[in-house]
Image (tube, rainbow, N blue to C red):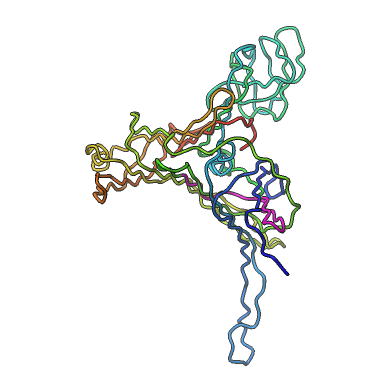
Amino acid sequence: MSMPIASYRSILGLGKETTPGTIAAPTLFVPFRGELKPKDHLKLLPDNGMRGSAVKTYDHIPGPLHAEYDWSGDVFADSIGIPLSLLGDVTVTGTPTGSGATTLTAASIVGASSVLSLASIPAGTLVQVDAGPIAEIRTTGTPTGSGPYTIPLTGAPLAYPHATSAALVPVTAPFTHAFSTLNSGTTQPPTWTVTDFNGLTTRQFAGLKFSECALKFNGDGLLEYSAKALSLASVLGTVPVPSYTPVTPMPGWSGTVAIAGTSVTYVVDAEVSIKRPVTPIPAADGSQAPYALWSEEVEVSGKLTVVMEDETELLRYLQNTKPALDINFTQGTGANLSGIRLRMSKCAYTLAEINRGKKYAEITITFEADANVTDVGASGGYSPIKATVTNALPFGTFK
């Protein structure tokens, strides 16, 4: 007797691709809640050529082929950076170890695989070069010289130029990963491979780009998110062996909110949606796969429900003051510190409604985050949001 497939055996794994569209083995396994929604899209082209009969369609010819992949769950600080990577610009900084800090004795260039340092640094040390949006973390090789010292850097060449006297600081976990809109190069975000074990077979979705990451919370629930993405068509893979971290989800009550730079305690619930449409581009190139999955412009919108203590939030709407909105969740301490912060420096309230359906009045606010020069990363330009994730994962995880 045949038995149904147990959905609770499903496994969701993701791996960042080195080459877009080339399958990457899963490096992060993501707990999910709610339905996984993989969907291969095959466009069938109808043959409607008339052949002397009273019928319309004689055949269907296979056309372009791509896939969609959606899921939802509770926010885990070590994996929420995956859908947030749709923004594209990522800066990673670490926590100084407290010793061994030094400076560069000469400027470095983009693509450099070593730097000149005032002091020697042992091989195998994790160091942060510079600070701010152009900070980079690398592992040192064996130093040479007697001062200044040549410090080899492994992992990847430097992505940014660094000036003489820029800081060179040994760092450790936790690391912060700051996501902003990428405004340089192709402006395209990284691609991922989803490995989906459904309890019977494994299907892999390569070339995946996220089109939406939406987060929401309320005072009596967990911080949650949903993700939507497009990818190449699925192919069969091997059953993964999952490994999950001890990081736990965050309760809504643990979050803090600041509006216009002032901490407030009257936010009942909130939603923030980051959208970046992804368009499949078909081409006559001998393949059903799209020529490219093209990420378009970033837009951010959301909703707040606040207890009405006075007319402060209503007046922000009526006067179009566009306040900054900060949502911050943290948990743990020291190397185990983790969390997520959403910073929108210019929020236009598009509607503010007073609701008196409960025993106390509330105001429901909808907003759109305007692009600004404060929430940008190393690529500059404008960005409507900066999302900062803190966890123990090293540089290169989300970029």
- In the rendered image, the vertical position of residue 348 relative to residue 379, given as above or below: below
- In the rendered image, the vertical position of residue 56 relative to residue 337, given as above or below: below
Residue that extends furthest to the front in the rendered view of this protein: 1
Choose top left, top right, bottom left or bottom right for residue 157.
top right
On the picture, is 191 further left or further right than 228?
Answer: right
Give the number of marks. Answer: 0
Q: Residue at x 62, y 71 (%)?
A: 44
Residue that extends furthest to the top in the rendered view of this protein: 146
Find residue 130 and report its horizontal and vertical position in percent. Answer: 58, 20
Q: Quadrant of the C terminus?
A: top right
Span highlighted in magenta in the image? 195-215
Does residue 249 show up magenta in the picture? no
Does residue 205 show up magenta in the picture? yes
Find residue 360 and report its horizontal and vertical position in percent. Answer: 25, 44
Q: Residue at x 65, y 53 (%)?
A: 10
On the picture, is 396 further left or further right than 261?
Answer: right
In front of the other: 105 or 266: 266
Find residue 194 and report its horizontal and vertical position in percent. Answer: 65, 50
* Residue 198 seen in the figure: yes
- In the rendered image, the vertical position of residue 78 relative to residue 166, given as above or below: below
Find residue 260 and report its horizontal and vertical position in percent. Answer: 33, 32
In front of the other: 96 or 169: 96
* Residue 399 seen in the figure: no
Q: Quadrant of the N terminus?
A: bottom right
In front of the other: 111 or 324: 324
- In the rendered image, the vertical position of residue 16 relative to residue 168, given as above or below: below
Predominant secondary structure, magenta span: strand
